[in-house]
Image (cartoon, helix red, strand yellow):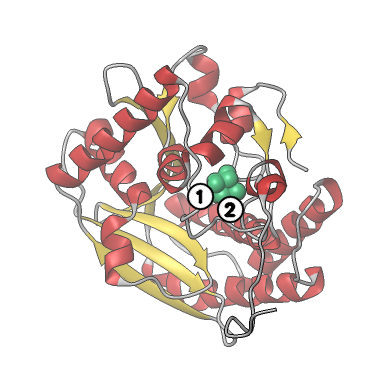
Amino acid sequence: MPKKNSGNKKAEEKTDYKREFKLLDENPGTVYLSASRIGMHVRCPKQYEFRYIEGLKMRPSGAMILGGSWHAALEVNYKQKIESRSDIKSTDMTEIFANSFDERVKNEEIDWKDEKPGVVKDVGVEITVLHHRQIAPTVQPVTVEQEFLVPFTDTNKLYGFLDVVDNKRFIVENKTAGRTPSEDDLFKDVQLTAYSYAYRSLYGKDEAGIRKDIAVETKVPKTVQMKTTRDGNSIEILRQMAKGVESNTKSGVFPPNPNSFLCSKKWCGFWDLCMGKKQKTTIFSDLGEKK
Ligand code: SF4
């Protein structure tokens, strides 16, 4: 069953373990949206209502714990690399990953679905080593985990963190995924559009490009680097999506979306509160036979 939040906005936004929220602390009462909020609203407004209006929290999945701990190891390496210009040892990165993973498993209520924690951890160690060997040497960070809170619509600011900005003015997002995204996935990714808008607002100029550095958790894990770009039209589309969130919030209307690819007992933590309690399915077989 989803848990009720304390009502703390920072806790609601928290997707990565132990992240700090300095700008929200310094600007109490700021009305803001993030790419993850906008994305959830598009996938299912009802899910958005459960999560951000009612403040209910879904239990993190094993994949989220793996992704967050992997991210923590990359962050430590990249932060020190701004000055040192060299990567820490692979074993240091896997140790950071494992410590973060173990701590989260100990302290959080995780929805493992059909996964085994030990197997998930082994995959995490493997993709941390892969990242260290194949991706980290290609990245020279200039900023890491840069927090942003920038004007966006008449009523909302846009909030989030830029994973990495590198020395070639590329915005880099570090991501774990179950499959390699398509070109189309990248083109439509609202998170990347939000990064682009934030970069332009912070630096007063366009980024050179956006790259997704991905650890793909296939049977044999691999890494992929994919590049994309954004223009004014992409940003305008994101702004219109944000206005849709504002409009629904104002009217208090959050329609469910059973056609969302996430609408299932497995993938929506609010299933029992929403579709589950109403579900009654009759399966007809042998339709040709009358009784
Ligand atoms: S069960 Fe389906 S319709 Fe209901 S909140 Fe979840 S995704 Fe939306």
Residue at image x 53%, y 57%? 262
Q: Amino acid at mark 2?
A: Val
Residue count near mark 2 (Cα–Cα under 10 Å), binned few <14, some 14–19, many ≥20: some
Q: Which mark is residue 113?
A: none
- Nearer the observer, 86 or 122: 122
| Residue ID for mark 1 | 79
- Against 269, residue 201 (above or below) is above
Q: Quadrant of residue 286?
A: bottom right
Identity of the amino acid at label 1? Lys
| Residue marked by disc 2 | 76
Residue 64 sits above or below residue 234 on the image: below
Q: The residue tagged with tag 1: helix, strand or loop?
A: helix
Residue 6, above or below 287: above
**Location of residue 106 in the rendering, given as x and y in whole percent from the top left corner:** 86, 52
- In the rendered image, residue 89, in percent from the top left (x then y), is placed at 61, 69
- Label 2: which secondary element: helix
The residues tagged by marks 2 and 1 sit, at their Cα atoms, a distance apart of 5 Å
- Looking at the image, the residue that sits furthest to the right is 106
From the image, which quarter does the N terminus lie in? top right
Near mark 1 (Cα within 10 A), the count class, few <14, some 14-19 or many ≥20, is some
